[in-house]
Image: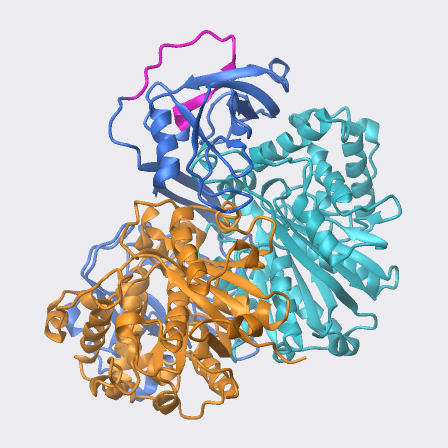
Amino acid sequence: MSTPLSAPLDIGFDYSRSLGPVLGRFATGLREHRIEGVRGSDGRVHVPPVEYDPVTAQPLTDFVPVGDKGVVVSWSWVAAPLEGQPLAHPFAWALIRLDGADTALLHAVDVGTPDAIHTGMRVRVRWAEETVGHIQDIACFVPIDTPATAARPGATGDPVGMMVAPVHLHYQHSASPEESRYLRALAEGRLIGQRCPACDKVYIPPRGACPTDGVPTAEEVELPDTGIVTTFCIVNVPFLGQRIKPPYVAAYVLLDGADIAFLHLVLGCDVDRVRMGMRVRAAWKPRDEWWTSLENIDHFEPTGEPDAPFESFAHHL
Amino acid sequence: MRDVAVAGFAQAPNVRHTTGTTNGVEMLVPIFAEVLTRTGLSKKDIGFFCSGSSDYLAGRAFSFISAVDAIGAFPPIHESHVEMDAAWALYEAWLKIRTGEVDTALVYGFGKSSAGQLRRVLALQLDPYTVAPLWPDSIGIAGLQARLGLDAGLWTEKDLAEVAARSRADAARNPYAQVSGTVEVSELLTEPYVADPLRAHDIAPVSDGASVVILASADRAKDLVERPAVITGIEHRVDSPVLGARDLTRAPSAENAGKAAETHDVEVAELHAPFTHQELILRTALDLDHRVRINPSGGVLTGNPMFAAGLARIGEAATRIFTGEAHRVLAHATSGPALQQNLVAVLEG
Amino acid sequence: MAKKLAAVLGTGQTHHRAKRTDVSMPGLLREAIDRAMADAQVGWPDIDAVVLGKAPDLFEGVMMPELFLADALGATGKPLLRVHTAGSVGGSTALVATSLVQAGVHRRVLTVAFEKQSESNAMWALSIMPPFQMPVGAGAGGYFAPHVRSYIRRSGAPEHIGSMVAAKDRRNGALNPFAHLRQHDITVESVQASAMLWDPIRYDETCPSSDGACAMVIGDERAGEAVPGGAAWIHATAMRTEPTTFAGRDQVNPQAGRDAAAALWREAGITDPLSEVDAAEIYVPFSWFEPMWLENLGFTPEGEGWKVTEAGETALGGRLPVNPSGGVLSSNPIGASGMLRFSEAAKQVMGRAGDYQVDGARVALGHAYGGGSQYFAMWVVGSAKPGR
């Protein structure tokens, strides 16, 4: 059996987060190279500030300025930094208790080797070149005797209320063995459904587990590229990440011989002419554009044959 | 309120890379068949289904929905899902049976960690405003916790290596384990740090896997397995997420869950400890002395299928009762960074 | 061995808006939680456990947010669960919280559901395609519109029904100080004049994208008896699931919904829902779902739901007011919407629904659905204890 198909799947968004009054004040301070904590119900000064007390759950509002120097409470070494981490060369994660704070902040310490950092070591903030009101305004920490740079605080102005948090992740997506067979057939211009051994229904795309019986669909059934539209909608609205230009008809296409419809495009006629029960045929892309995807079929178009009677497909709705 | 028992358990082999998909179906279908056959149940006999999994492991929103295909959910089923380790799905199922609403439940968890970069993804569990934007990876965080204990003299690197060596040796008897073998503690200590102070053996492997448990009312369980493992206590608690604001060398939520579940006199404890030092923290938190056999399965240091591993601890512990090896056992599951949230179950049979 | 009695002691929600940029996620949650605890007259020491519900983590880009929210939720040191059953999650979360009390495990449970979806973009999150697939999907609207077309065809419903529902729900929303969309002046004609987004669903027939949260405190019998003015007693609960797609699946009138409703009415001792239910908060994100769900829930025979709508019976003052709060069409923080339905039903029988109070409401339905119309969670609440 050949290996299942896989392809990269990247998911990313630059999230825009509103900070609220407490974190907003903290962020505004960072922009101005100031660090504030908040005093909790037990008298401890929390840095970074927390909106709600861990003991009483009450909102906290008693702000306390703290220094930009502190002590390493613990550390661990990052030999090969990951995407998005504070430094691109090896560094230490550390819990750092700033002078005046009772809790420790998690951040990076820029020292060349693990021998150059130890618990109890004093460190200070290295501010980013440009500070905007974000935890990354603290670029990292450095040993306290490192010469200071001339980084200037960000301009004072309106309080910071928002931050941007890019979250970009990389996955390797695998198709199931059943789906892989179907996709490889598509690369050859063939439509392969699979029959569930328990319920006898022909699924396209085939399934790792028949949804009603929980067993893999197995027996291959070659299907023609003709069928009917069971139901559809006309998509008029553009949206983020959309790949087909509206207006277009998104239709459920039930291939002849299949027991389940799949979503595809209908083109080749006025959108208002598309009907439930309309007979359609696949319009394939040029062969040299084919790969392991249902996209090899550019769209379905009407054949001009009489519509299927409603009763013949009513149970597929 | 009536007692609930574990009546069956099955797990997929813990592997570095499954050829299956992130929706878990390929790993789940065979183990559902196995556990149903063993208990003599069919899917229509199951009163409630509950699962645990994470979209972020799969890189898909609603990834748990496709997993339901593995059940064959038609006619429609009574089903729910938590975006947590399936040990908490078992808790939800335990409640349902306690209320008398259902007599049996099938609980499952699955995770294909190999699809993404696990230690990076887990950074998204951290505070989204002041911590996650720095992308602190899960291993780095565990290293901070480990060093605190080393500095305080609570454990030594040798203590950690002993946990690893014992776990691997025990895993040799576990056909589902990913990592196993005999290794000398002194050898382990010569290995380089992967994330100082952690060495490779201190860190659970990245695993793909799945597990399933059948729960039943204690009465019904007698029809399904010779020695049901009755849950005499099941409790869970969570600690503050602020890593710098609590003593990371302790797990108060595990302590409190353990006290409430009443963990005295257990013979075996399956602990969900993805880092060697965390086993030591849990042993103290749960007051487990040298008489208690820890992780006869090898524990998650020998195979750590995310979102299934905590449930598998319950299944492994129950199995000691099924075989008659033990009569009072403990199972633990954890969620979040640095043992932030913990569940403890005590079973008897 | 029987389930213990449980009741809603109090409810709270946020002001739902397109973007709640004035608060962080903890702040958003606490707005709802603080209101619910005040409404229930409880303090933190009274809360035994917390159950959080939310739709996909992708919306906010936070993995397992119950972890970072533990302090804000007052859950530190307590049991904390996070339920995720797609769009029905607000409802199923309430059901898990209810189970905790019914099982005798806890006396009072705080349950909360939220979504701060403006941090990303809901249509983006709902339209992410894995590789190898045909990128035809156009979010939730694009998913449901073909099935709405099927309903219209099957039932023969006239075209204006969708617009009638939209106008009604938005006008109801205008009576709800927390609603996102509050449109006093909307009419059936103005809805019909709005743009077709995914034919046959129009712009004004579509739910907004909202940031918001909803919370409830659920208590045991003794706690319920102590509620001034009366608690909302939980008479029945039901949830069912079926696969998103399978050969021959009825996408318009899913079996899972029918089964859940049948189990629900049975437990509640209700044989004629249209007569015996005084108010219904039903999950209607696209207006045509009102007639579809009326049929699915068994209020009317199949094919006849639209007639009840057309006759004005689902308006305030009608025989079965549906979504007196304005419903999902007026506010849709996805993870919270199900719990909003459940809590608005509770408010009706507690007499706490203000300007959209259904006079004399004693029995109300809360309903939620999710995924591809495959997850259903619902409850019946009453002003009297069940069996009385």
**Residue A146 belongs to magenta span:** yes
> Quadrant where the N terminus of chain C lies?
bottom right
Q: Nearer the viewer, residue C19 or A167?
A: C19
The residue drawn where x is 34% and y is 89% is: C300
The residue drawn where x is 55% and y is 24% is: A96
The residue drawn where x is 58% and y is 21% is: A72
Residue A34 placed where, x, y %? 39, 22
The residue drawn where x is 57% and y is 19% is: A71
Q: Nearer the viewer, residue C11 or C306?
A: C11
Q: In the rendered picture of this protein, how many numbered marks are placed on residues?
A: 0
**Residue C332 belongs to magenta span:** no
* B209 to B136, vertically: above or below: below
Left/right of residue B231 with respect to residue C306 in the rendered view = right
Q: Nearer the viewer, residue C108 or B312?
A: C108
Residue A218 visible here? no
Query: Residues in magenta?
Result: A136-154
Left/right of residue B287 with respect to residue C166 in the rendered view = right
* C140 to A241, vertically: above or below: below
Residue B281 placed where, x, y %? 73, 40
Say which quarter of the image contains residue B274.
top right
Residue B195 placed where, x, y %? 63, 28
Residue C296 visible here? yes
Say which quarter of the image contains residue B216.
bottom right
Left/right of residue C155 with respect to residue B168 in the rendered view = left
* C243 to B258, vertically: above or below: below
Apparent colour of chain C: orange
Apparent colour of chain B: cyan
**How did the renderer colour the structure?**
by chain
**Chain painted in blue in the figure:** A
Say which quarter of the image contains residue B85.
bottom right
